[in-house]
Amino acid sequence: MIKTAIVTGACSGIGLALSKGESEVQPAPQQWRVVLADINDKAYEAIKASLPLSRAKGANAENHVFVRTDVSNWNDMVNLFRAAFEWPGEGQGAIDFVACNAGIDDIVLRNGLLDDDDNKDNEAEAPVPTQPDLRVLQVDLHSNFFATRLLVHYTRKTKRRRRLSSPPILETATATANGDWTPKMVVTASMAAQYPFFLIPQYTAAKHGCLGLVRALSPALLKHEGITLNCVMPGTVDTGLIPQPVLAQWPKEHLTPLDTVIRAYMELIGDWDRATMSERVASDAVDRDLKNGCAVECSADWLWYRDPVPFMDESMRFVAEQSKEEGILGRFTAELKVKMKSTKS
């Protein structure tokens, strides 16, 4: 079976390691072909020779394609998902896995909030401060909303096509909205999704948002669309981007190897055969069941499945519970949607 994956930020760091692993020639029954998405087309030219070009020796079926993508641009993301969905060959017409990995961080020492005014020495004539550059939020957070919207769209499209071409799948209590087919999305968040990273506040805010998106949306996304949504939260990973003066001072025991993060990804998409190839990495995953709404902290040689903070009192628990579909707010929203639909019709 050939499956199609999208990896953003695919030409360096975690994205490159993930792309290489997915595009390797793998034994049956499951093989992956990967759409590499990156804003840096020169970086792709530099690494493409290290990627397998076909799924088998002498085969014409490509293992990967490259689509230049600015993930903060809606039109670029539309083009990326369309290219993955329409990619000819076995696996065409379905997107099975999306790794939302592309990311940037604040420009160190210029976070846009504490910058000096342009004319700070002349208070009487000080201009209005420069509007802060919020591209970090656009790349690291907003793009995940784009990806989710597009994956939902193409999952529905796949489901409609399959329903028309074959008898409908009977749903069971344990079946997803798509029967046995469960597309998966994993967001590369950061340890900054839980802890403050003091030098880069915009990055910290964006990664907190990634974690919030996963925990708030994942139950409904699986229930109604049959899609799982999870995130990984790595510590400091040596991806070649850390300045050498910093890396020289960084204790090795506080670096997280790439294969620790890749194992987290493999667990979250259910590829346990490849996950357990990283024998030195320990995981506190309690079972091998379908993962949804999980936030996996990747620290050194450990994977920690982190729960949300506990409720401090019953009032806060009540408020949160009422935001679920079966809660007061959930029922109100459902009724409002029905009224709006009837008004339009």
Image: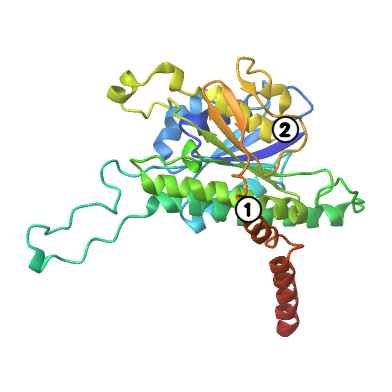
Residue 180 percent across, percent down from the top left = 83, 43
Q: Nearer the viewer, mark 2 or mark 1?
A: 1
Q: CA distance from mark 2 to mark 1?
A: 35 Å
- Marker count (numbered): 2
Instruction: Give 129 or 84, whichever is nearer the viewer.
Output: 129
Q: Amino acid at mark 1?
A: Asp
Q: Residue furthest front?
A: 313
Q: Amino acid at mark 2?
A: Gly
> Seen in the image, is 39 located left or right of residue 182?
left
Mark 2 Cα-neighbour bin, 10 Å: few <14, some 14–19, many ≥20 = some
Q: Is residue 87 above or below residue 148?
A: above
Mark 1 Cα-neighbour bin, 10 Å: few <14, some 14–19, many ≥20 = few
Q: Going from the N terminus, do you reach mark 2 or mark 1 first?
A: 2
Q: Quadrant of the rendered structure where residue 188 is?
A: top right
Residue 324 percent across, percent down from the top left = 71, 59
Residue 77 percent across, percent down from the top left = 53, 53
Query: What's the image's color scheme?
Result: rainbow
Q: Quadrant of the C terminus?
A: bottom right
Q: Which mark is residue 270?
A: 2
Instruction: Give 265 or 73, whichever is nearer the viewer.
Output: 265
Q: Quadrant of the N terminus?
A: top right
> Seen in the image, is 332 located left or right of residue 170?
left
Which residue is denoted by mark 1 in the rendering?
Answer: 313
Q: For the residue labelled by badge 1, is the local secondary structure a helix, a strand or a loop?
A: loop
At a point 43% along the width and 52% down the height, the residue shown is: 137
Residue 17 percent across, percent down from the top left = 53, 27
